[in-house]
Image (cartoon, grey):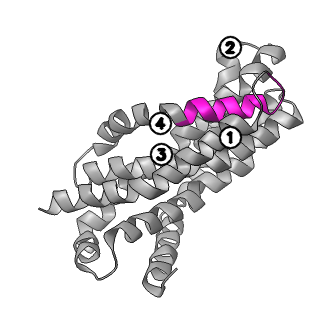
Amino acid sequence: MSSPLAALFGRELRIARSVGGGGAMGVVFFLILVSLTPFAIGPDLNLLSRIGPAILWIAALLSTLLGLDRLFQADADDGSLDLFIMSSTPLELVVLTKCAAHWTLTALPLIAAAPLLGLTLGMEPAALAGVAASLLAGTPALTLLGAIGAGLTAGLRRGGLLMAVLILPLTTPILIFGVASASAASGGTVPFHTPFLILCGLSLMAVAGAPFAAAAALRAREA
């Protein structure tokens, strides 16, 4: 990573810590969602362990998108976004760096917390490992897709709801293969590597395409 991008990455981490840390908020939100599910479904551990991967993935999806609507909002408000667009550093790399910082602050704590919360759902060790591995492979795609929505809604008041409406349908394939790979880790007719590799492919596609889409949305906003 070049020096300007490294400085930007460090800046994003410092800003997040100074405003209270989005990672801690995401983990708390993740904990609340997972903890409320047994109250809605009931204390049947067999049922909870069977649907545990889906519960963890849905909670992780919502927690990852939490705060993504503000990914470019502060930059748009203070004029930093204009400087990013006019700088010699490609805007696509700026977007990718900001997404990497957001993923580090929000997704990594969720990945670490998911196996612990999975224990409360009665999940087996193999299923817990599968959930952690699938989240590690799939959350980059969630963050990058969220960046597209953040670029489209940058500068709009109450753009978080609009971003969710735009992005959540696009996350459906990631959710499907994420839950499938996590469930296959504890046994089943489908081997674990099949949905897991598809999930990795979706993240690689997001890395290749989402920064360009988000940068185009930000440039269109300034046009």
* Earlier residue among tags 1 and 2: 2
Residue 39 lies within the magenta run: no
Residue 32 percent across, percent down from the top left: 63, 35
Magenta-highlighted residues: 174-188
Asked if residue 116 shows in the view, the reply is no
Q: Which residue is mark 2?
A: 41
* Earlier residue among tags 2 and 3: 2
Determine whether 35 is above or below 71 in the image: above
**Residue at (33%, 60%) from the top-left corner?**
72
User: Which kind of residue does numbered mark 2 sit on?
Assistant: Ile
Quote the CA–CA distance across marks 1 and 2.
28 Å
Furthest residue toward bottom: 3
**Residue at (66%, 23%) from the top-left corner?**
37
User: Which kind of residue does numbered mark 4 sit on?
Assistant: Thr
Q: Are marks 2 and 3 in contact (CB under 8 Å)?
A: no
Q: Secondary structure at mark 1?
A: helix
Count of labels shown? 4
**Residue at (52%, 70%) from the top-left corner?**
13
Quote the CA–CA distance across marks 3 and 1.
24 Å
Residue 205 percent across, percent down from the top left: 48, 50
Determine whether 8 is above or below 61 in the image: below
Q: Which residue is mark 3?
A: 66
Q: Which residue is mark 4?
A: 171
Badge 1, how many Cα within 10 Å: few under 14, some, many 20+?
A: many
Q: Which residue is mark 1?
A: 196
Furthest residue toward right: 125
**Residue at (63%, 36%) from the top-left corner?**
178
Quote the CA–CA distance across marks 2 and 3.
24 Å
